Image: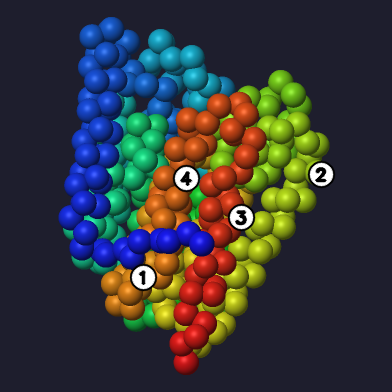
């Protein structure tokens, strides 16, 4: 029988390792930036942020509809000719309102400010959930957060929206609704939160839907009604589901069971089956937790981000920054009630899971280890405190 050491949230060794992990992230990023600067490329890596910046610039030029066609890619490559990455914009028109300030600055400056601001916002939310040094450094040293920062993605912002929505759901449903509406700028990340609001706080759901409608109306007034039709026709969901072999290269960066199955060579239908089983299992666990009155709120809240990462087939490795608010709620429950055997090891596996997708080779990428860890964590949360009255 395996002996799992007891975990203490105040263990100084854990803080030491997390600080070293963060120092490593920072050193690697600084070295890479210096390499690109000295090389005269002008582009600090092939960041997805260029798509956000270019879309915002097109909005300021009064041509937001161009973000959904070749104009965005042309603008990105005109700004950074050395980049070989194709850029696109598939987000709903309301997303323009969220990122509009980016277009008034040069791209690299906007990237730096965006990363600092969104990371700081996430750290503040984590601190509101659990104010400990361990939680702070676990967030700052997260591999998913490092990947997210380098790509200039919105994962930290989405994680902050989700964490704050869960944190304020019971006492401040308007605040929860606002954050839920902003999270809906990436619709595939908001479904589980909507379900939880329906089960637990319908007032928060009502505010969420009202604010979404208000944002949609504001976007329509500014950009015109045709922008919605342009966005709808640009959505790659059908192309994503029916991708041919030439497009399978995208699956080595995706972090969903559907993508892993497609990477393994399975057909579209065969790939949907295991993904649907895992997604429905995750949703069933969330529903079971939130419908039980004797389950601690922190356990319920911890399950939401983990289940969210199992729902969508279109999910990248940097989206795993979404686990951080879930782990924060989980850690808060441990601090209040004590840990169980193997619990810290499972949490650490979830915390490190994005590295599997990013660094695994062609063989290891065929094993859905991150998704298996997420499912294991959800089942653990479901059974964790069942002996409590």
Q: Position of residue 97 (x, y in %)?
A: 40, 47
Colour mapping: rainbow
Residue that numbered label 1 is attached to: 339
Q: Residues within 10 Å of mark 4 (few under 14, many from 20)?
A: many
**Could you tell whether 379 is left or right of 128 in the image?**
right
Q: Nearer the viewer, mark 4 or mark 2?
A: 4
> Farthest residue in the bottom direction?
389
Of pointers 2 and 3, the one earlier in the residue sequence: 2
Q: Earlier in the sequence, mark 2 or mark 1?
A: 2
Q: Secondary structure at mark 1?
A: loop
Question: Looking at the picture, does residue 48 appear above or below residue 176?
Answer: above
Q: Which residue is mark 2?
A: 269
The residue closer to the viewer here, 126 or 56, is 126
| Residue name at image x 33 percent, y 65 percent | 6
Reading the chain from its start, which is encountered first: label 4 or label 3? 3
CA gap, disc 4 to disc 1?
Answer: 21 Å
The residue lying furthest to the front in this view is 1
Q: Nearer the viewer, mark 1 or mark 3?
A: 1
Visible in this render: residue 277? yes
Residue on which the image places disc 3? 311
The residue wearing badge 4 is: 353
Task: Estimate the x, y position of residue 325 in percent, counting from the top left.
Answer: 37, 60
Residue 58 percent across, percent down from the top left: 43, 30
State the SS at label 4.
helix
């Amino acid at each position: 029988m395996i002996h799992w050491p007891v975990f203490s949230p105040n263990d100084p060794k854990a803080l030491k390792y997390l600080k070293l992990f963060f120092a490593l992230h920072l050193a690697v990023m600084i070295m890479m930036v210096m390499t690109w600067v000295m090389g005269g490329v002008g582009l600090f890596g092939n960041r997805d942020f260029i798509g956000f910046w270019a879309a915002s610039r097109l909005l300021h030029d009064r041509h937001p509809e161009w973000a959904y066609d070749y104009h965005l890619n042309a603008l990105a490559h005109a700004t950074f000719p050395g980049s070989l990455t194709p850029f696109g914009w598939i987000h709903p028109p309301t997303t323009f309102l969220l990122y509009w300030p980016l277009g008034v600055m040069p791209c690299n400056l906007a990237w730096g400010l965006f990363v600092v601001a969104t990371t700081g916002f996430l750290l503040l939310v984590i601190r509101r959930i659990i104010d400990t040094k361990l939680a702070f450094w676990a967030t700052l040293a997260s591999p998913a957060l490092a990947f997210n920062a380098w790509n200039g993605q919105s994962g930290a912002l989405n994680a902050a929206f989700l964490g704050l929505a869960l944190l304020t759901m019971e006492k401040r449903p308007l605040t929860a609704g606002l954050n839920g509406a902003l999270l809906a700028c990436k619709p595939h990340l908001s479904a589980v939160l909507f379900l939880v609001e329906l089960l637990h706080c319908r007032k928060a759901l009502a505010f969420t839907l009202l604010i979404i409608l208000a944002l949609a109306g504001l976007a329509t007034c500014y950009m015109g009604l045709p922008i919605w039709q342009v966005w709808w026709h640009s959505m790659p969901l059908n192309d994503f589901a029916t991708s041919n072999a030439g497009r399978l290269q995208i699956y080595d960066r995706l972090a969903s069971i559907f993508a892993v199955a497609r990477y393994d060579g399975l057909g579209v239908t065969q790939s949907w089956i295991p993904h649907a089983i895992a997604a429905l299992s995750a949703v069933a666990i969330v529903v079971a937790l939130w419908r039980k009155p004797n389950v601690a709120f922190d356990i319920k809240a911890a399950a939401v981000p983990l289940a969210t990462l199992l729902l969508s087939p279109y999910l990248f490795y940097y989206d795993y920054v979404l686990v951080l608010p879930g782990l924060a709620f989980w850690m808060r429950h441990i601090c209040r009630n004590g840990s169980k055997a193997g619990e810290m090891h499972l949490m650490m596996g979830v915390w490190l899971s994005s590295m599997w997708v990013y660094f695994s080779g062609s063989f290891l990428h065929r094993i859905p280890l991150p998704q298996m860890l997420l499912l294991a964590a959800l089942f653990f949360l479901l059974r964790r405190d069942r002996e409590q009255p």
